Image (cartoon, rainbow, N blue to C red):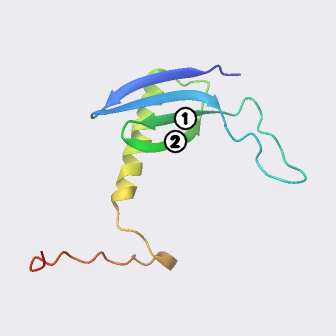
Amino acid sequence: MHSRRTLVFEHEGRTFTAQAAPREVAVREEGPGATAAPPEDVWWWFEVSGDPQRYAPFRVGDADDDAAVHDRMIAYYVDLLARRAERPVGRFGSPGPRRPAADPARP
């Protein structure tokens, strides 16, 4: 089993704080037949300064070293920011509604 590990690093003016920890939600389902997450179900959780969300995009691997974890988190977060900046997709894959252009004649 993996022990808790914490990594802190800077990237493009943001501080990333990452920790290897078990899933916080121990039960995968509710009701009859619910199963508890196994203790070896350890994920990389991370926070980024200026972003209120906490992320757990991938499980801890035996071959994870600091550089590999750093690279994976940066790639994940850069991709996430790019997806957030894209135009929203509407139902059935059609483009979402366009945002109205600002009218320069209106104050």
Tell me: residue 2, above or below residue 86. Answer: above
User: In the shown orientation, is residue 94 left or right of residue 103?
Assistant: right
Tell me: residue 76, above or below residue 17. Answer: below
Q: How many marks?
A: 2
Which structural element holds mark 2? strand
Mark linked to residue 55: 2
Q: Residue, x 33% and y 58% (percent of image)?
A: 85
Looking at numbered disc 1 in the image, what kind of residue is underneath it?
Answer: Trp
Q: Residue, x 52% and y 22% (percent of image)?
A: 6
Quadrant of image for the C terminus: bottom left
Q: Earlier in the sequence, mark 2 or mark 1?
A: 1
Task: Tell me where residue 62 sits by quadrant.
Answer: top right
Residue 33 percent coordinates (x, y): 89, 51
Task: Tell me where residue 23 sits by quadrant.
Answer: top right
Looking at numbered disc 2 in the image, what kind of residue is underneath it?
Answer: Tyr
Residue 54 percent coordinates (x, y): 51, 41
Assess disc 1: are there few (<14), some (14-19) or many (≥20) residues with their C-alpha within 10 Å of its C-alpha: many
In 3D space, how far apart are the residues under numbered discs 2 and 1 (Cα atoms)?
5 Å
Q: Give the residue pinned by disc 1.
A: 45
Tell me: residue 66, above or below residue 75. Answer: above
Q: Are marks 2 and 1 in contact (CB under 8 Å)?
A: yes
Residue 15 percent coordinates (x, y): 36, 30
Tell me: residue 74, above or below residue 81. Answer: above
Residue pushed farthest right?
32
